[in-house]
Structures are given as structure tokens and as C-alpha cells.
Amino acid sequence: MARMDMSLVDNSQIAAGSNNASSLLELGIMYSTGRDVEQDLVSAHKCFNLAALQGLKEALEYRQEIASEMSPQEIAEAQRQARDWLSMN
């Protein structure tokens, strides 16, 4: 998986713009790699899924890659969280 230098990104800016596809992709990368946050594949999958829904093809590739490392229950939880996020935003 590609790595980004997240030290150049202000986490508060990402969180504030988390309905933006590129911000969601960045959050997914942070969660999937454990960069500046605790690694959390469920949250990463959720962020990649939301970014993919907004048209980022790169997010589809990342989501597929981490899904291969997740259990079916973890994937179901990530999908549930994505649905919840969509209903609130």
C-alpha cells in the first residue's frame, strides 16, 4: 500500500473536512497504516468505502486491499459504520 507523509497533514483539518472524498481517503490511509493514530482496519475500510462512494477509484483499491486482511465480521461492522455515517451526514 502506498504511504503518504501524514506529518504534513493537520489532523484537525482532515476531521473538519471528513465529508470530502480526498479527506476520507487520507483518514483511511492513516487508519490502515497506523500513522499518527492507532491502526484500525474497520475505520480505514469505512473511510475508503465513503471515499469510493464519492468517486475516488483509488479508495476502491485500498478498500479491497485491506478487506483481504479483515474478517467478514469486521467488514460488516465497517459497512454498518459507513451507513450510519451517511445517515448522519
Image (cartoon, rainbow, N blue to C red):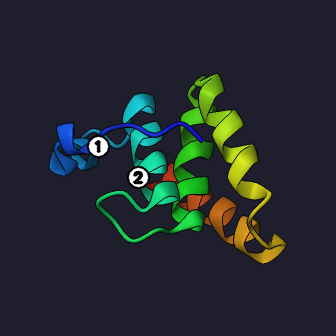
**Circle 2 residues within 10 Å: few <14, some 14–19, many ≥20:** many
For label 2, the residue is 30
Q: What amino acid is found at the position of numbered circle 1 in the picture?
A: Met
Res 49 → quadrant: top right
Q: Residue 4, image x and y in percent?
A: 39, 37
For label 1, the residue is 6
Q: CA distance from mark 1 to mark 2?
A: 7 Å
Of callouts 1 and 2, the N-terminal one = 1
Q: Residue 54, image x and y in percent?
A: 56, 28
Q: What amino acid is found at the position of numbered circle 2 in the picture?
A: Met
In this rendering, the answer to whether 60 lies above or below 57 is below
Judging depth in this view, the residue of 8 and 46 nearest the camera is 8
Q: Say which element carries label 2.
A: helix
Q: Residue at x 68, y 46 (%)?
A: 63
Q: Residue at x 21, y 45 (%)?
A: 7
Res 24 → quadrant: top left
Q: Residue 14, image x and y in percent?
A: 26, 43
Assess whether mark 2 and mark 1 are in contact (beta carbons under 8 angstroms): yes
In this rendering, the answer to whether 53 lies above or below 56 is below
**Circle 1 residues within 10 Å: few <14, some 14–19, many ≥20:** some
Asked whether, in this view, residue 89 is left or right of residue 37, the answer is right
Asked whether, in this view, residue 84 is left or right of residue 8, the answer is right
Judging depth in this view, the residue of 32 and 46 nearest the camera is 32
The total number of labels drawn is 2
Res 80 → quadrant: bottom right
Q: Residue at x 68, y 60 (%)?
A: 79
Quadrant where the image shows the N terminus: top right
